[in-house]
Amino acid sequence: MTGPELLVLWDIDNTLVTARGFGMRMYREAFLDAFGRELDGPVDLGGRTELDVVGEILRRHGIEHTDETSRHLSDALANSFHARRDDYPVHAEVLPGARQALEHFAADPRVHQGVLTANLRSVALIKLESFGLAHLVDWDVSAFGDEHLDRAELVTIARDRARHLRPFADDEVVLIGDTPHDVHAAVTAGVRLVAVATGRSSRQDLHRAGARVVIDDLSDLDLLTTGVWAA
């Protein structure tokens, strides 16, 4: 075998960057733009794919859930983020150690890294571009929240895209994320995981969901690196 020994796939929200409340604001703007109505109540966005969230919103508001209505709301969401892209870094921040971790693994020839995110591709790009992080991951081996309802299936999509490097075995794929949805995706797909307790889920929540390796945050690069290679 030649090429990288690990495929590392990063979650974005509350793993690399955080902007609590901004995503909900964008959904409210998008729903109003798409359907001319106010979004009714909050929506749990934590770790759920965009297709999952969009489906819930449509059903809750009595809108037939079709490919067309789903795409209509997704396009409106992408447009809202694009229109507000200059506002995003004002409300958001890079989480401790995230930049250093991305740079470390980008410089390691044994590692190839992408993102595995619930976001739309265009939204994910805006979020990482806002902080000068986008060039550190390979967007061609990444998977996004509008590509499958089930986050575990995104692992398969990313692995298939990485086959031009070489096939990555289950124990050569590592997800890094902060929610039980990330844990579920890794367990279901049979790959490895480093969970970080930087979102709403505590260490105990992540362990209960099935994570074996849980760290407080990304600030201890040695601890993270050990977790990635030994998870």
Image (cartoon, rainbow, N blue to C red):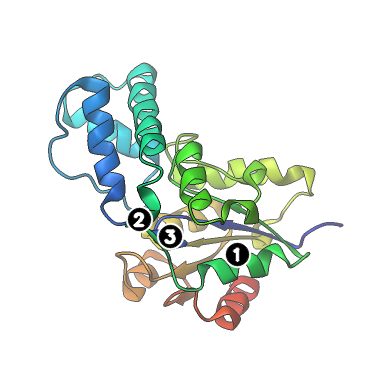
Mark 1 residue element? helix
**10 Å neighbourhood of mark 1: few (<14), some, or many (≥20)?**
many
**Residue occupying the point 44% across, 57% down:** 182
Residue at horizontal 77 percent and vertical 59 percent from the top: 4
Image position of 150 with respect to 90: above or below: above
Task: Assess disc 2: are there few (<14), some (14-19) or many (≥20) residues with their C-alpha within 10 Å of its C-alpha.
Answer: few
> Which amino acid type is shown beneath numbered disc 1?
Leu
Mark 2 or mark 1, earlier in chain: 2
What's the distance in space between the residues labelled 3 and 2, CA to CA? 12 Å
Left or right relative to 25: residue 165: right
Instruction: Please give the name of the residue rendered at 29% of the width and 64% of the height, measured from the top-left corner.
Output: 200
Which amino acid lies under the numbered mark 3 shown in the image of this protein?
Val
Q: Position of residue 16 (x, y in %)?
A: 47, 61
Against 141, residue 4 (above or below) is: below
Which residue does the numbered mark 1 point to in the structure image? 102
Where residue 161 appears, as percent x and y from the top left, is 68, 41
First reached walking from the N terminus: tag 3 or tag 1: 3
Marks 3/1: CA–CA distance: 12 Å
Q: Quickly name the residue at label 2.
A: 90
